[in-house]
Amino acid sequence: MLRVLLLEDSPTIRHVQKNVLVKAGFDVIIASDYADGHRILLRHNNNEQRLDAAVVGWPKKPSEASQKFFATICTQEYSSLVIVLLAQIADSSIEQCVASRPNTELLHWHDYRESRSILLSLHEKAQANEVEQVDREVIVEPQIRVLFVDDSVTVRYKFKKLLSEHGYYAETAATVAEGFDKAVSSDFDIAIIDYFMPEANGDVLCRKLAGDQRTSRMTSAIITGTYLDHAIKECLEAGAVECMFKNESEDLFLARINAMSRHIRARKSIEKERMRLGGILQSVGEGVYGVDTEGRISFINPACMNILGIDIERDFIGEYAHKIFHYAEHDGVEISAEDSFLQIAYEQGYSVQARETVFWHRSGSPIQVECTVYPLTIEGEREGSVVAFRDISDRKLLEEELRWQANHDVLTKLLNRRHFEEQLTQEVQKSQRSDELSALLYVDLDRFKYVNDTAGHVAGDQLLMEIAQMLSSRLRTADLLARLGGDEFALILRNVKKDEVESIANAYRKMLEQYMFVYNDKQYKVNGSFGIAMIDSTTESAGEVLANADIACHIAKNEGRNQVHLFVPENDSKQNMDLDLGWSTRIHDALEQGRLVLHSQSIIPIQGIMGELLKGNGEDFKEGLLANLHHEHRHDEILLRLQDPELGIVYPGAFLPTAERFNMMDEIDLWVVNAAFERLAKLQRKGYSGTFAINLSGQTIAKTQIIDVIEQRIIELNLDPSKLLFEITETSAVSNLALANELITRLRTIGCYFALDDFGSGFSSFSHLKHLPVDYIKIDGLFVRGVATDSSDRAIVKSINNIAHSLGKKTIAEYVENREILKYLIDCGVDYAQGFYIGEPTELSDATLHFGDGSDEVVTDVGEQFAEYAEEQTKHAQTK
């Protein structure tokens, strides 16, 4: 925990800054004025509880106390103390203080939230500098000797001083001849040679050093003040390993020297390391062997001999490893040397990481191994490879067991729900591409709970195992059976006729009907209710099939149990089954058990350069451009999904109507607000600058408590309110006009934004726009979808856009599904677009927001084209 002194004249700024620091976990000590700050400074410097940092407001008018305070912190004694200066305007005196004092940075008032990250960064750097200083002090004598050759006295002095200060022994020479003489007469590790010199250029000295046996082990580097391709090429060809520039930063120069030094130290210790490794090779438990560049064995350690059944090492030295123990696949099929990845790695010098393969024991039995190949390079020459491997036979057996368990129900040995849903998804996809029909049978046992409760769980388990065996006995070869959980089973009937499905299901039903479960001499009658859902080319998803079959099964139970029911969409509407299926219970359980999931969909700007690029280029360009669009310029609408244990991902259209009927929307909205705010807070701490668009329902708008909750959470999470956009529908806003106005006014006061959603679908009165102080108008997708083909829709969209702009509001078009729609919206002047053509909804994560994965950098041809286009447009505008 950092101990931070906070000194600021303004009570307001002091209060706000204190909250930021305390929330960051800092131990904050408040100073009332500069005299008090000076006393705290001296007191804490003389005890164990020293200050780590200070956040100090720059005085509006210098005083004796402020001058004394700043004079003290600028002394050497306090140089390691991190200082963040708060100021409204950066004048020359502040800039001079920041420039002259180490570990100091300026922070403008309006960026006060950045104090946490600045303090941590400065403190980390200060600690690193202290460690570096200590490291330099413990170096008694230089380990690396550097010869610096340059004809300039000034340059020689500068770099000799820099090298000496950082622990290197440095000597200088003014010419190629002097440099060579010194290199021969003394023992240097590195030669840094200026390229342009009077009598001969630096590449000459590089060649002389490399060609002389006495100096050939020296590492040469060229330094120059000018970048010239031919000069760099000549020096590298002459033996230089690095090219440096006189005008580059000292840190970069030292980093290059350090890199060369590390290489030199490694080279010097290689013989010692080789001896040490020899001892290790004899003792490690993993098999290790070496080969030359042709794959001939050069050494084998004892563990390798033991695993492969090798008795005498010398009998195999010089033999090809491929011929001895990795010549065939696990099934005995021979692998040619040309096709062996190991042989290729030996010959080409490739590294291989944790690759599974098969080695052969001298007895002729295969051994499953995991091997890693390390290319062996000594002094720049490839000498072969070292291979480390271990026997993973036991692990493979365990993995196979775990794989089986992951896909099967442990009790019944049938497929489990997870694997069954994967197979069902594949079956749906196959049916979508063909004329074949399949069916899903959903089986729910009748009276299972009675058996389980009266005879006990052991009896219940026994019953489930017997039912599983019975169902499996009638299973066709192509069909699939699984236990979904509890007393529910499911079958996929492949390639069946619709008029045969019910008879197949009835055959299963009659089999259960005739079955009598006997346990402890007691008999129990157990039947089954069967729901059927067809799978054809119109089926959209596995979730839809499961839901339909589940509905059909419930209908079968409601019709008296021990029945078969085929789902008929026209009669068995999901919407009419809401109450029977207990959607309110599902929603309540999802809230309690954390099974609500946030998804997001991008809203992008389409005017200006963005619009020109989207109109003028193809699909590939669009995809790349959107991927490179910085999050600062994009909104992300937060969408809600329900993760149901039985139905999988459920879309809001299926459960929100029930939530509205049961007055649960305000509870759902509260969950969304909290979850979205927490995610946004984490992202903003990482540097995310995009905007979250969050929907609020009519029920929530009608309750003013949500305003207090939102304000409180913004403060608690230190959110930037300008990155919050709340969406309310036109219908809900007009129905609660006074309350909607209060919500919008209060939250806009602290910096939030508002959008009127689905405009045009409800009361359709432009007059409402005058009374609702929203910032954005979202044009209803009903009209947007038709703009490419319908003149009426085009007229409506254009009118909404023009009137919204005349009132100072921006427009967003939703349901943008193709290029033609987008092109019209750009031409029409709509500000933002959202829809499947722009991007489909995806689960909310850093990656789906194109954040935290390197996408902030323009790294593609598309990004470069975008940048070039922007530059051309700017130049064009300047000439007009």
Image (tube, grey):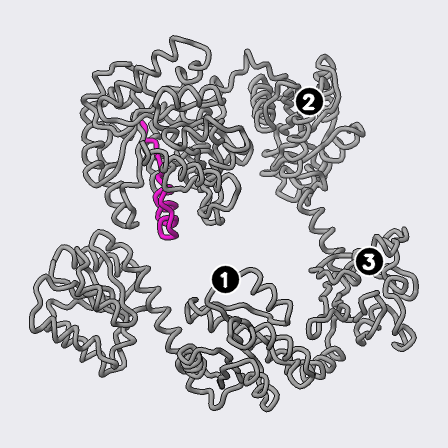
Which circle, 1 or 2, is nearer the viewer?
Answer: 1
Q: Which residue is mark 1?
A: 227
Residue 473 falls in which quadrant of the image?
top right
Q: Is residue 848 above or below residue 57?
A: above
User: Which quadrant holds residue 433?
Assistant: top right
Which amino acid is tagged 3? Val
Q: Residues within 10 Å of mark 3 (few under 14, many from 20)?
A: many
Residue found at x 65% / y 44%? 458
Residue 493 percent coordinates (x, y): 72, 24
Which sits in the foreground, 93 or 415? 93
Report the quarter where the C terminus lies: top left
Placement of 55 over or under 768, stated as above or below: below
In the drawing, does residue 518 fall left or right of residue 313?
left
Residue carrying label 3: 358
Residue 589 visible, this orientation: no
Mark 1 to mark 2 CA distance (whole Å): 61 Å
| Stretch of the chain drawn in magenta | 675-698
From this view, report whether residue 3 is shown above or below residue 279: above
Nearest the camera: 647 or 328? 328
The Cα atoms of the two marked residues, 3 and 1, are separated by 52 Å
Name the kind of residue labelled 2 in the image: Arg
Q: What type is the residue that disc 1 sits on?
A: Tyr
Q: Which residue is mark 2?
A: 433
Furthest toward the front, the residue is 199
Residue drawn 45% across and 40% down? 868
Kindly state the secondary structure of the residue where label 2 is placed: loop
Q: Secondary structure at mark 1?
A: loop
Is residue 67 in view from this perspective?
A: yes
Please name which of the two marks, 3 or 1, marks the residue nearer to the observer. 1
State the SS at label 3.
strand
